[in-house]
Amino acid sequence: MIKRLAYLLTIILISSCHSYTAISSTSFEDVANGNCTVIDLTYPLNRSNAYWPAPSYAPFTYKTVATLKDDGVFSGAYSTPEHLGTHIDAPNHFEENQSSVDELRLETLIGPAAVIDISDKVENNPDYELTVSDIVDWEKANGRIKKRSIILLNTGWWRRWDDYEKYKNADDTNKLHFPGYSAEAAGFLVEKRFSNGIGIDTLSADYGISTDFAVHHIINSAGKYILENVANLYKLPPAGATLIIAPIKIEGGSGGQARIWAVLPPP
Ligand SMILES: [Zn+2]
């Protein structure tokens, strides 16, 4: 199993770090030696992190339980909803009989990133939903989305990250307004492009005013995952980056915080 994973990592990283002719087992070293640019797509956890605004959810908390001065060791304790900050939604989040976060196959948490930028469309319409024709346009410019890709939607919403109220963007009737994927686009990505998962730089893959969470149902019923509140998507090229996702392993959990980073090909 470990050998298989190492082999898979090597193949993926080779395509990201070097030309295809430079196939060797040195690709891990290339990353470690700084020959590849690595971009962190994770927001640091703190009390002001965005989370799903339901009554039973609460902000991230952290308290110091031991200090170097008093105890000779520094140590803390924290609490958080699973769906806070940069995190993953496991397939069991919206569907019965699907994997919990600890059951996600690690092979599915590494793959080519396809980054679709809809920030110009969102600027005039915060309720914009990614369409299949947006995906087709992306493919005209960048080639067909590879199997087992992870799709990342750059909506430009990251500009609001530091202000939770602006990030939620609730109206007078408490309806949220932020962009997302359309149900058709989500279906296309899992059924026609065999994507491993999808991600977005907002609170939810469904747009804010959704009441049926159709995108969550489509993705989760296909056994796939969703990444939410993903940082720094504007720093990624549309194609060519390799994504690595490392979610917290909560037994039976519906998701949880994930460290996500991208390895870029050399300039
Ligand atoms: Zn979530």
Image (cartoon, rainbow, N blue to C red):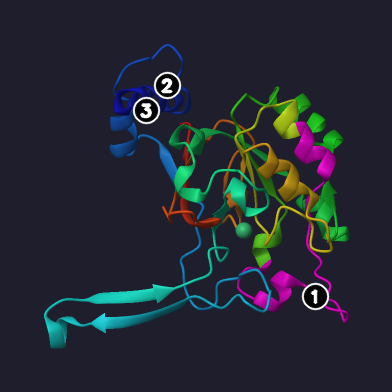
Three-letter amino acid code at the position of disc 3: Leu
Q: Is residue 226 visible?
A: no
Viewer-closest of 242 and 2: 2
Q: Which residue is mark 3?
A: 5
At a point 15% along the width and 76% down the height, the residue shown is 73
In this picture, which residue range is highlighted in magenta? 160-188
Q: Which residue is mark 2?
A: 11
Q: Is residue 2 left or right of residue 139?
A: left
Rendered image quadrant of residue 194: top right
Q: Which residue is mark 1?
A: 170
Q: Residue furthest top?
A: 21
Image coordinates of residue 128 in percent, x first then y, are 85, 54
Image coordinates of residue 4 in percent, x first then y, are 36, 23
The answer to if 34 sits in the magenta stretch is no
Above or below, comparing residue 216 to residue 115 in the picture: below
Above or below, comparing residue 214 to residue 146 in the picture: below
Query: Is disc 1 placed on a helix, strand or loop?
Result: loop
Instruction: Specify the quarter for ligand 1.
Output: bottom right
Q: Is mark 1 within 8 Å of ligand 1?
A: no
Image coordinates of residue 246 in percent, x first then y, are 43, 47
Three-letter amino acid code at the position of disc 1: Ala
Real-space Cα separation, disc 3 to disc 1, in angstroms: 43 Å
At a point 55% along the width and 64% down the height, the residue shown is 85
User: Which callout, 2 or 1, points at the residue further toward the start of the chain?
Assistant: 2
Query: Is disc 3 placed on a helix, strand or loop?
Result: helix
Viewer-closest of 259 and 232: 259
